Structure formats: C-alpha cells, structure tokens
Amino acid sequence: MHRFEIYSVSSLIGWSELELGDAPMGVAFGRFLPAPGYMAIQAAVVAAQGGPLPEELLLSIRDSNGAILESCGVVHIVDHSSELGPEGLEVSILGVPYPSYEVVFPEQVSAYKQQFNRAG
C-alpha cells in the first residue's frame, strides 16, 4: 500500500493509505492518521459533521512524489475521534478519473474485478 499525504492549503495535516474504495465511482478512502498540523483545523472538521467542510480548508491529497491527486470531487475528513478514539478518523477523495484511478489504486480495481470472477 502507498502512503498518501493530506494537506490543508500548504500544511501537512495527516496521512492515509486510502486502503478502500469504489473503483467505478472513482472513490478512495481509508483511515486518517493526523499530523500535528491537523489540530489547527480539527474544530472546523468536527463542526462540519454531516455536511461539507469549509472551502477555505483547501484539502488535497498528494502521492509519494508530492503530486496532487486529480479529482473532480472533493477531499473529505470525518472525525468521530471524541467517541471512537483514533479509529474514528477517516479521509476520502471523490471523483478520481480513469485512467488515473487505475494507476494510483490498482488494489481497489483488482478487488472490484475479483467480485465478478467468483463462482456463484
């Protein structure tokens, strides 16, 4: 698995392996591991539960080379850490187009294809 960096504007706020996804929808998500920079925006993330995050957070996800992942959707963080501890943090990216999705998230594409190869 690859480790992706999550930024708010130009500040590193955390990491994720984006280990899960919905390949046909261009969605990837996974556990969010906060960096010290997350504290500066955590209150805004918690306040937005159930709704869109403030646009001024300018969330982005970068690959190991520092390139921003292309998407036509949004990056979203869900924070239920006050109830669930560190397991209650998740990040998602929506609308990653093909063929980029297949290049960046081959494991999710493979898992999607495998469900059609199972004997029924």
Image: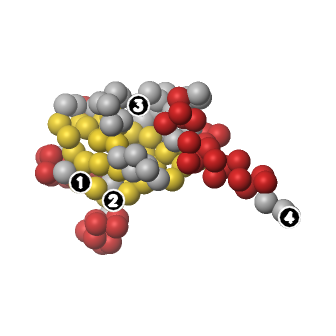
Mark 1 closeness class: few <14, some 14–19, many ≥20 residues within 10 Å: some
Task: From the top left corner, tell me how far across and down residue 90 is, in percent.
Answer: 38, 55
- What is the spatial separation of the Cα atoms under label 2 and label 1, in whole angstroms? 8 Å
**Helix, strand or loop at mark 1:** strand
Looking at the picture, which amino acid does disc 4 mark? Gly
Q: Is residue 39 above or below residue 4?
A: below
Rendered image quadrant of residue 80: bottom left
- What is the spatial separation of the Cα atoms under label 2 and label 4, in whole angstroms? 35 Å
Looking at the picture, which amino acid does disc 3 mark? Leu
Classify residue 18 as left or right of residue 106.
left
Which numbered disc, 1 or 3, marks the residue that appears first in the sequence? 1
**Helix, strand or loop at mark 3:** loop
Q: Is residue 26 above or below residue 16?
A: above
The numbered dot on residue 91 is none
Q: Is residue 24 above or below residue 90?
A: above
Residue occupied by mark 4 = 120
Which numbered disc, 2 or 4, marks the residue that appears first in the sequence? 2
- What is the spatial separation of the Cα atoms under label 2 and label 3, in whole angstroms? 20 Å
Task: From the top left corner, tell me how far across and down residue 32 is, in percent.
Answer: 33, 54
Residue occupied by mark 1 = 34
Question: Do the numbered discs 4 and 3 sit on residues whose CB atoms are within 8 Å?
Answer: no
Task: From the top left corner, tell me how far across and down residue 44 is, in percent.
Answer: 23, 47
At horizontal 39% and vertical 39% (from top left) the residue drawn is 75
The numbered dot on residue 69 is 3
